[in-house]
Amino acid sequence: MWSAQRLFGGRLLEVARAGDAAGRLGSDPAAGRSLDLTIVFPAGEPYVSEPLLTTGEAGRGDSLYVHYVDGVTVRFGFDHWVTGGSVSRPVPVDFAVVHHVVLSWGALLPSDDPARKRLRLALGGQVVLDAPVTYFPARPEQVALGTNPIGMSTSRPAFTGELMGVGSTAGPANEGGAAAFHLTSP
């Protein structure tokens, strides 16, 4: 089960399963090539960072976080324990609307997959972060959505916005695919 149930700071609206692969994302995050997140960013404090995805364990972990630059701009960042990582360009967002984030996170892919050494993030269909990265190995139970259970220094303990949906897709971060698991709003 995703660690988000324990620490997620926003509203978790409803859980629903879809298709033949129902539940696959929760038990095996590597089942799809990308994660598709449907979220509303919290309006509020600038200069704050919150986790979107954390993998691994303390001392050997990785995190994708969102940094709120001001009331209309965010940046996405990758943190590889001890060495840091890439940060996106400033991206304008409307904090009052639902956003779709598609993420290719190499740590969730098989070790022989060539995409394992990249991080690719698309917001609303636009790639905003595409970088070569190194990931620590992570087991399925070490994947935390919307939380920072391993204490990465680049973000707060939990995402405080609304996580409205999570899916797994078959393609890279800018392509669609079949959802394996969804959290949906009423």
Image (tube, rainbow, N blue to C red):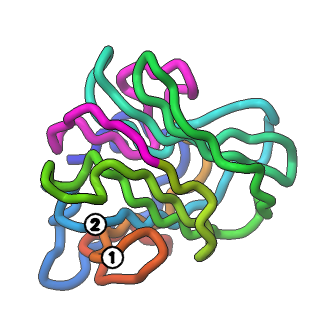
Whether the residues at callouts 1 and 2 have beta carbons within 8 Å, the answer is yes
- The residue lying furthest to the right in this view is 71
- Image-based side of 93 in relation to 9, left or right: right
Amino acid, disc 2: Arg
Residue 40 tag number = none
Q: Please say if 38 is above or below 177.
A: above
Q: Estimate the x, y position of residue 48 in percent, counting from the top left.
A: 71, 31
- Sequence order check: which comes first, mark 1 or mark 2? 2
Q: Which mark is residue 33?
A: 2
Q: Magenta stretch containing residue 153, yes or no?
A: yes
Q: Position of residue 68 (x, y in %)?
A: 74, 41
In the image, what residue occupies the spot 62% across and 43% down? 66
Seen in the image, is 39 located left or right of residue 95?
left
Confirm whether residue 163 shows in the render. Answer: yes
Question: From which residue to which does the magenta span run?
Answer: 132-157
Question: Is 26 part of what is drawn in magenta?
Answer: no
Q: CA distance from mark 1 to mark 2?
A: 6 Å
Q: Is disc 2 surrounded by few (<14), some (14 to 19) or many (20+) residues within 10 Å?
A: many
